[in-house]
Amino acid sequence: MDRVVERLRERDLAALLVTDLVGLRWLSGFTGTNGACLVTADERLFLTDFRYTEQAAEQVGDGFEIVRAGRDLLGDLASRLPPGRAGFDEAHVTVKAHARLVEKAGAGAELVEAGGLVEELREVKDDAELERIAAASELATAAFEKTIARGLAGRTERALALDLEQEMRTAGAEDPSFPSIVAAGPHGALPHAEPRDVEIPAGVLVTIDWGARLDGYCSDCTRTLASGPVGEREREVYELVLRAQEAALAAVAPGVGCAAVDGVAREIIAAGGHGDRFGHGLGHGVGLEVHEGPRIAKAAEGTLAASSVVTVEPGVYLPGELGVRIEDLVVVADDGPRVLTSFTKALTEI
């Protein structure tokens, strides 16, 4: 909250309205589905309705005054705005909600766009957040190892994905960070392939992208395995992606440009003859959301900050043939990247 107040001064804002539930959880600890907060230099209000007042009393930090709002939570929030510029996140406020805020705003209050203020602060994790992300990654890896130990060939992609997600839940995950991807053979050429009720054949590459959510925080990892011996073509593409991934991983450091890190992997893949088959960005931030800032891509702006958590996940996708993606979850640190994903990146036959 102190960091938020500093940003208010920097942006000449008298207040900040937070209505996005993810940002609200990060600021206050609240996990319910209806709430908002108002932050000024001198006041920190948390508003929710009668369904969540007891939950708020248990979860919301001591720095907040908890206010029981009526059915018109936005109206109650707006009526408490102090005179001056009040920032709101335009990415999370609908046109209808904005109109309501303007209608009910207190005298002298001016609503101004302040998008990204909380998201930017969330990019840098504190020690407790890093511990939670590391624990989620450890849980996800253990679940993955148990799942693939039961084999690949002969199981359907969908059955494998469901098995993996159940293993994560059994181990204590709240839920998967996102719907798991299992894509075998030519289906792996789809970066966001959906698991099918199709059996995985022997002797193909199988891309598995999965993650667990634990204590609110996400993990994210991708491995491409072999369901038996594969050909030279598959091995060449795999080794190319692995070289690109490891080189980009080594480039991750505080102060390095996000686009520059992406460029390390992209140049290697282009030199290998597959530059036009790596169409997505190299990575993204991970925290309370599995996709958050910073963005690591060729057109990305900004630099990496210490204690950010990012993915490094180059891929090559050859339509009708195969796909390879290798992804690690990494803490940006002064003494070098700290990799949170522990499963081997050597091409593994299952």
Image: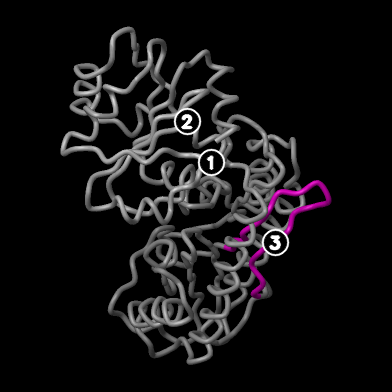
Q: Nearer the viewer, residue 234 or 3?
A: 3
Kindly identify the amino acid type of the residue bearing the numbered disc 3.
Val
Do residues under tags 2 and 1 come within 8 Å of each other at their CB atoms?
yes
Residue on which disc 3 sits: 339
Residue 196 rendering spot, x and y as whole percentages: 30, 74
Q: Which of the two discs, 1 and 3, labels the residue nearer the N terminus?
A: 1
In the displayed structure, 68 sits above or below 346; it is: above
Kindly identify the amino acid type of the residue bearing the numbered disc 2.
Gly
Taking the image as shown, residue 295 lies to the left or right of residue 196, namely: right
Taking the image as shown, residue 112 lies to the left or right of residue 318, namely: left
Q: Nearer the viewer, residue 158 or 232?
A: 158
Secondary structure beneath label 3 = strand
Q: Nearer the viewer, residue 143 or 206?
A: 143
Can you tell which mark lies on residue 293? 1
Dot 3 surroundings within 10 Å: few (below 14), some, or many (20 or more)? some
Q: Give the residues in magenta.
A: 326-343
Residue on which disc 2 sits: 116
Kindly identify the amino acid type of the residue bearing the numbered disc 1.
Gly
In the displayed structure, 229 sits above or below 346; it is: below
User: CA separation, marks 2 and 1?
Assistant: 10 Å
